[in-house]
Structure formats: C-alpha cells, structure tokens
C-alpha cells in the first residue's frame, strides 16, 4: 500500500475539499483533523471521510464559505455558530474561547451550534491540554442509537472525550463513541464490500443485520445497554438543549440524501489551579498512573494513539491504493 508523507497527504485532502467548494481555511482545518486521525491509527475518522465531506459540500449540505462567529457570551460561557460549515473551524474557535475563559474564571463552557461532523472528539482537546487545563468534549450526531426499549434510531453515537494534562509526558486521553462500534467502522466495511458482525446494528425496521449499508441507515447497539443509552441522552441535552442545535432525530443521516446538518458540540475546560492547585493535581494524577502501571499489562488511555502519531511523523501514513486513487481524483 502507498506510504505518504503527512504534508503530502494533507495537501491532497486540502485540494479535494477546496475543489468541492470549501474555503482555504475550512479545507485546511478539516484536512489537518482528518490526517491527525490517520496518524493516530483512527481511519474511521480519517481521510476515508473526505469523499463524504466533498459530497456534502457539493450538495450544499455543508456551507463551504461559512465563517464561524460567537453569537452569545456571558462570563465563562459562550456560544459559537458554525454557520453550517464543516465543524473544525467552529470547534477551534470554541476551544480557543474555552481556554481563555477557563484561565480567567477557573472553568468554561463553550457550545457550538449549526455544525457538521465533529471528527475524532479528542482531537479538539489537544490545545486544552497544552494550556495545562483539563478538557471535556461532547457532540451529538444524526440518529444512530434507539431510545431504550425502542427499535428506531433516535440518539446519535454522541461521542465523549476527555484530556488530562501531565507535567512531563503525553496527556491521558479518553475518547469513545457510545455505540458498540463507531459508525465510521461500518462505513469502512461498506466501502470494502464486507459484512459486519451480527450484534453491531439493526436495520431501519429494527431487525438485526449484517449488511453495512442497512446499518448506516438503521440503528447501532449502545455500549452497556441502558447505561449507554442514558449517556447518549445526557450528551444530547448538553450539545443541543444548551446550544439550540438540532437533536439527533431531527438530523438526516450523513449517508443518504437529506438536509443540512445542525449538529451541536460542547467544550468544557477546567483550570486545576482554581481547585486544589496545579501542583496538587499533577501529584495526584501521577500517583494514580503509577499505581495503574504497577499492574502488568495496563496501558494508559491515549498511549497507543501517541505512539502511532510519533511513528507517522517519521514514516508517513499508509493508505490503500483505492483510497489514494479516490483522493487523487477528488483533488484534480
């Protein structure tokens, strides 16, 4: 399979998105996020998404000329309108505001409304950790999980991410979708013409399916049954009730014709120095990590991603010939 340097792959994605109608800044922000996911070994949130983004830009489901702006603010909170564009510029503005407000107030909450696919949730929190803050990120998405007891998709996959900075090591990174398997993985199965394992998803009639295309327009199993469903409800309310975005059941699937997504995101930043103090936070965190690693076989959350990214910077990113061909055609 082709091995592409990071810069080369990023330029290819930027050209593809610009050809589809994205502004230079929007294309660059999205490309960096998608390539970062590839670097960390997350192809489900990486460059295989480019074709879908391009399709949405061409169809008008994503506004390639959108410029995110702050529409409300009060103390440690603010609301960003992404303008119907790809999510990454609006999310970056929210993160920037959350950092600055947390540094002033000790804690901050930045919401984003009228947005699009959020990508890998933890990606957005890297600047929060670099600022020495604890960060949490949430997003809703088009309906994917049935409400408990129901058979039809209602809540989104509604990912949750958290980052905990360390003094002299890579941060602890937690990033998870609230489904047994991420939708992006099912998308990869569909692209490759492979069946999915039974138990991953239901079709639109509420019947178990091994057909990835039926799964993409059906519903996915929540992690932990009712517990995962309740977490999805919590994320839905944080990202939509507080931001004015569209609920998951009000958004059309990304994978079939529909209207413009109006996804909501939420970024929370906390300054450890405003509580027990930055030194106490770091000391207590390291005690926990030392005890965890004393049990042979334990791996810290985010460690594998960090090592994969280091390797990718040195060696480049391996993608399939089919994906390289697809990207090259989109970038012409």
Image (spheres, grey):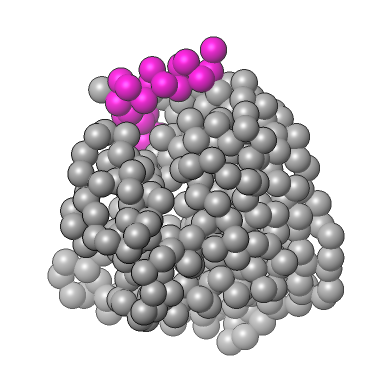
Q: Quadrant of residue 18?
A: top right
Question: Please, what is the dominant secondary structure of the magenta stretch?
Answer: helix
Asked if one can make out residue 272 in the rendered structure from this viewpoint, the answer is yes
Q: Residue furthest left?
A: 296
For the residue pair 237 and 291, the one nearer the viewer reads as: 237
Q: In this view, does 100 lie above or below 107?
A: above
Q: Which residue lies furthest to the bottom in this view?
A: 276
What residue sits 43% from the left and 45% below the top? Answer: 45
What residue sits 43% from the left and 40% below the top? Answer: 46
Q: Where is residue 39 in the image (x, y as percent from the top left)?
A: 40, 40
Q: Number of marks in the image? A: 0
Q: Does the magenta stretch include residue 185?
A: no
Q: Is residue 42 above or below residue 171?
A: above
What span is colored magenta in the figure? Answer: 312-332
For the residue pair 214 and 123, the one nearer the viewer reads as: 214
Q: Is residue 315 magenta?
A: yes
Q: Where is residue 41 in the image (x, y as percent from the top left)?
A: 34, 44
Q: Where is residue 260 in the image (x, y as percent from the top left)?
A: 65, 46
What residue sits 41% from the left and 51% below the top? Answer: 217
Asked if one can make out residue 173 in the rendered structure from this viewpoint, the answer is no
What residue sits 53% from the left and 77% below the top? Answer: 234
Give the quarter of the figure containing the N terminus.
top left
Q: In this view, does 128 lie above or below 30?
A: below
Q: In which quarter of the image is residue 85?
A: top right
Q: Is residue 248 above or below residue 273?
A: above
Q: Quadrant of residue 38?
A: top left
């Amino acid at each position: 399979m082709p091995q592409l340097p990071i810069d080369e792959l990023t330029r290819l994605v930027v050209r593809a998105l610009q050809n589809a109608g994205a502004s230079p800044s929007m294309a660059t922000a999205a490309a960096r996020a998608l390539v970062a996911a590839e670097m960390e070994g997350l192809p489900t949130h990486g460059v295989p998404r480019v074709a879908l983004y391009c399709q949405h830009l061409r169809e008008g489901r994503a506004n390639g000329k959108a410029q995110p702006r702050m529409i409300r603010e009060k103390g440690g909170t603010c609301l960003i309108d992404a303008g119907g564009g790809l999510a990454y510029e609006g999310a970056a503005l929210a993160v920037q505001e959350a950092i600055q407000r947390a540094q002033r107030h000790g804690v901050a909450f930045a919401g984003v409304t009228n947005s699009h696919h959020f990508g890998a949730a933890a990606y957005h929190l890297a600047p929060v950790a670099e600022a020495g803050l604890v960060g949490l990120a949430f997003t809703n998405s088009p309906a994917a999980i049935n409400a408990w007891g129901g058979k039809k998709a209602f809540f989104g996959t509604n990912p949750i991410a958290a980052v905990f900075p360390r003094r002299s090591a890579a941060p602890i990174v937690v990033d998870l979708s609230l489904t047994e398997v991420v939708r992006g993985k099912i998308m990869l199965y569909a692209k490759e013409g492979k069946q999915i394992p039974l138990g991953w998803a239901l079709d639109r009639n509420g019947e178990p399916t091994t057909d990835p295309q039926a799964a993409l327009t059906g519903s996915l199993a929540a992690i932990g049954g009712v517990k995962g469903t309740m977490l999805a409800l919590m994320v839905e309310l944080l990202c939509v009730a507080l931001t004015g975005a569209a609920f998951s059941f009000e958004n059309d699937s990304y994978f079939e014709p529909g209207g413009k997504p109006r996804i909501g995101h939420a970024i929370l930043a906390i300054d450890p120095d405003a509580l027990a103090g930055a030194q106490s936070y770091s000391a207590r965190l390291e005690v926990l990590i030392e005890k965890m690693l004393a049990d042979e076989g334990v791996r810290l959350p985010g460690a594998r991603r960090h090592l994969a990214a280091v390797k990718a910077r040195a060696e480049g990113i391996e993608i399939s010939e089919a994906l390289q061909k697809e990207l090259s055609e989109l970038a012409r």
